[in-house]
Image (tube, rainbow, N blue to C red):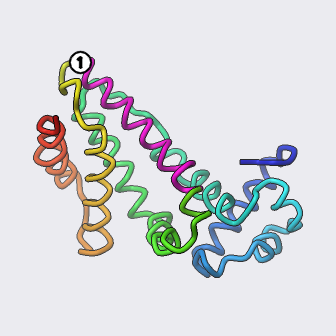
Amino acid sequence: MEAGPKLDPEREQAILGATLDLLAETGYEALRLDAVASRAKASKATLYRHWPGKAELVVDAIQCYEQADLAKNTDTGSLRGDLLATLSGIRDLLTGDLGQLMAGLLAALQKDADLAAAVRSSMVEDKQQINRQMLDRAIARGELPADTDPNVVPEVAPAVLFMRIFVNGESVDDDFLAHLTDDILIPLMVRSR
């Protein structure tokens, strides 16, 4: 998303960290780029050279924070193992500091078309590609039929986890992830054709 010359990694981390800090303090709607620049000891012009707007800056900050969790494409050798690894990453993300930020962004996604577009293009599409690769491996191993609906995992798993964590206030332990995998996701994928 950067438009200008590459930022020094330390400067970029300072800006992205300031963005996350202010996002946690003020929420998305009240987040201002001049406040980010001030907190990061950078100029507002520097921010605009590298990010076209607030939405792109926020998405980059969140991606930087979460890159180790969900961006990896874990191949455990089985669909069940891949699902458990993916669900564990989602759980860790949602129950960590970033989960609170993302929960707060949900309302902003409905009101801010730029943020919604940036999230869809930068975050959601990446996760869909990883999901597709996981399904392709399972199909190649004969664990799933070739016409398995690729939307089952990305539509069902985050919704169940979000509901359990943020709405019901319940924990998501390894036993629950096994239940979600064995009793809900795999049966839905097998029957989705």
Q: Which image quarter holds the C terminus?
A: top left
Up/down of 20 relative to 6, above or below? below
Label 1: element kind: loop
Is residue 128 within the magenta segment?
Answer: yes
Q: List x then y, in percent, for residue 39.
A: 78, 73
User: Magenta region: which residues?
Assistant: 118-141
Is residue 162 within the magenta segment?
Answer: no
Q: Which residue is rendered at x = 22% and y = 35% of the image?
A: 80
Q: List x then y, in percent, for residue 116.
A: 54, 62
Q: Which residue is rendered at x = 24% and y = 27% of the image?
A: 78
Q: Which residue is rendered at x = 57% and y = 57% of the image?
A: 117
**Residue highlighted by disc 1:** 141
Q: Is residue 77 left or right of residue 7?
A: left
Q: Magenta span: helix, strand or loop, mainly?
A: helix
Q: Is residue 44 left or right of residue 61?
A: right
Residue 95's quadrant in the figure? bottom left
